Image (spheres, grey):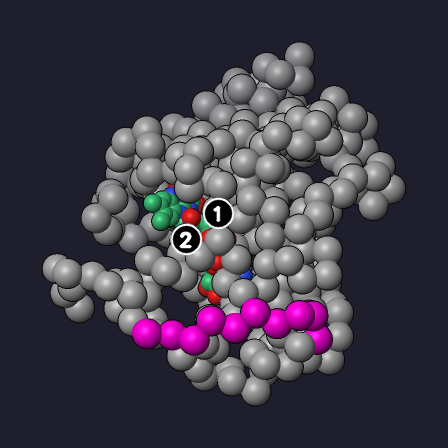
Amino acid sequence: MSLNPHPTLPEFEYIRPATLAEASDFLSHHSDTARPFLGGTDVFVRMRDGFMSPKFLVDVKNLDGTNDIRFDPQGGLIIGAAVNMNRVIASPDVQAHFSLLAEACRSVASYQLRTRATIVGNICNASPAGDTIGACLILGGTLLIHGASGFRREPLTTFFLGPGKTMLKPGDIATAVQLPLPPNNCAGKYIKLGRNQLSDLSIVGVTAFGYKDASRSSGYCFKLALASVAPTPLMPPEVETYLANTPVTADALNEAAQLAYEACSPIDDVRGSARYRKQMVRYLSAKALTEVWKQLG
Ligand SMILES: Cc1cc2nc3c(=O)[nH]c(=O)nc-3n(C[C@H](O)[C@H](O)[C@H](O)COP(=O)(O)OP(=O)(O)OC[C@H]3O[C@@H](n4cnc5c(N)ncnc54)[C@H](O)[C@@H]3O)c2cc1C
């Protein structure tokens, strides 16, 4: 498909439901022609470029608590779907307990874009390149969803089915993402490799996270999540298992990075070749894991 040299938005009808029930009802009755949106930073670009042309755009901001960001040590952090990334970054609770998520948000495009873009939109767009998805996955995130038959929860580990494909069904509206309180003295690092420093999707994104854990024979738990190197965001379990059972040394971290290299299956595209991506996964995984290890002291 060639890009339109004079892009404009196609005609659409703007729908602003008053409640989640009304929104789910409308979306389930117009499943082929209606689409929910939040910041619109993916939806409008894809419409402009001719990749989708919904007849109805359903604005799901401002519905029943979707604008709130809440924290308590038992329930963890609940980020409403409509909360933009700059609000997440500025939240004192995020800064105190979820600095990895703030770091991932800061890597997304520019300040201006982040006043519109949301974490829930990033998740529901289900691009393997989504910068905030790795942190949400690694921190044990769950999506809260209102569907035609009421509320339910979907763990992010099983949410992604392929590029742009998720467990969402017609009528489903993600209302928030919930992250449990991370263990004490944890550490995290997000490294994004892009073609430039601003406004580009990742060629490779590596999120690393770790904490001391007496229940593992190594005394540590480490997790890794990878962006842009598989059809879905990837959290290779081999890395966690290996570093749970092997004394943590510089060599062991390099070996874990090699396991990440073997687990990923990137494609060639305009941003980078598959071969380059795999090499960068190994290099950046070792770098991110080492950084986390240093932070853990
Ligand atoms: C210039 C530019 C630069 C960008 N740079 C980056 C970048 O560096 N990193 C990155 O990860 N992304 C980037 N993006 C992509 C985009 O900004 C992010 O994916 C953003 O997080 C999307 O959030 P949103 O609220 O705008 O989503 P929307 O565009 O509103 O929605 C995204 C998708 O989710 C669906 N959806 C929206 N809300 C819901 C809901 N409540 N329930 C169910 N489905 C829903 C929509 O139908 C759509 O398919 C960039 C985009 C642009 C235009």
In which quadrant of the rendered image does the N terminus lie? bottom left
Please state the total of marks drawn on the protein image: 2
Three-letter code for the amino acid on which mark 2 is drawn: Thr
Q: Is residue 19 placed above or below 143 in the rendered structure?
A: below
Q: Position of residue 88 (x, y in %)?
A: 61, 37
Number of other residues with Cα within 10 Å of mark 2, as a class: few under 14, some 14 to 19, many 20 or more: some
Ligand 1 under 8 Å from disc 1 Cβ: yes
Q: Is residue 171 placed above or below 269 in the rendered structure?
A: below
Residue 61 falls in image quadrant: bottom right
Q: Report which residue position mark 1 lands on.
A: 117
Residue 112 falls in image quadrant: top left
Q: Position of residue 47 (x, y in %)?
A: 32, 66
In the rendered image, residue 272 lying in the magenta stretch gets the answer no
**Residue 120 at least partly seen:** yes
**Residue 227 at least partly seen:** no
Number of other residues with Cα within 10 Å of mark 1, as a class: few under 14, some 14 to 19, many 20 or more: many
Q: Position of residue 241 (x, y in %)?
A: 63, 40
- In the image shown, does 153 or 64 lie closer to the viewer? 64
Q: Are marks 2 and 1 in contact (CB under 8 Å)?
A: yes
* C-alpha span from label 2 to label 1: 6 Å
In the rendered image, residue 17 lying in the magenta stretch gets the answer yes
Left or right position of 4 against 252? left
Q: Report which residue position mark 2 lands on.
A: 41
Instruction: Write the start and end of the magenta stretch as one range.
Output: 11-21
Q: Is residue 30 placed above or below 86 in the rendered structure?
A: below
Left or right position of 126 against 170? left
Q: Is residue 231 placed above or below 117 in the rendered structure?
A: below
Label 2 sits on a secondary structure element that is loop
The mark nearer the N terminus, 2 or 1, is: 2
Ligand 1 under 8 Å from disc 2 Cβ: yes
- In the image shown, does 61 or 279 lie closer to the viewer? 61
Q: Position of residue 244 (x, y in %)?
A: 67, 34
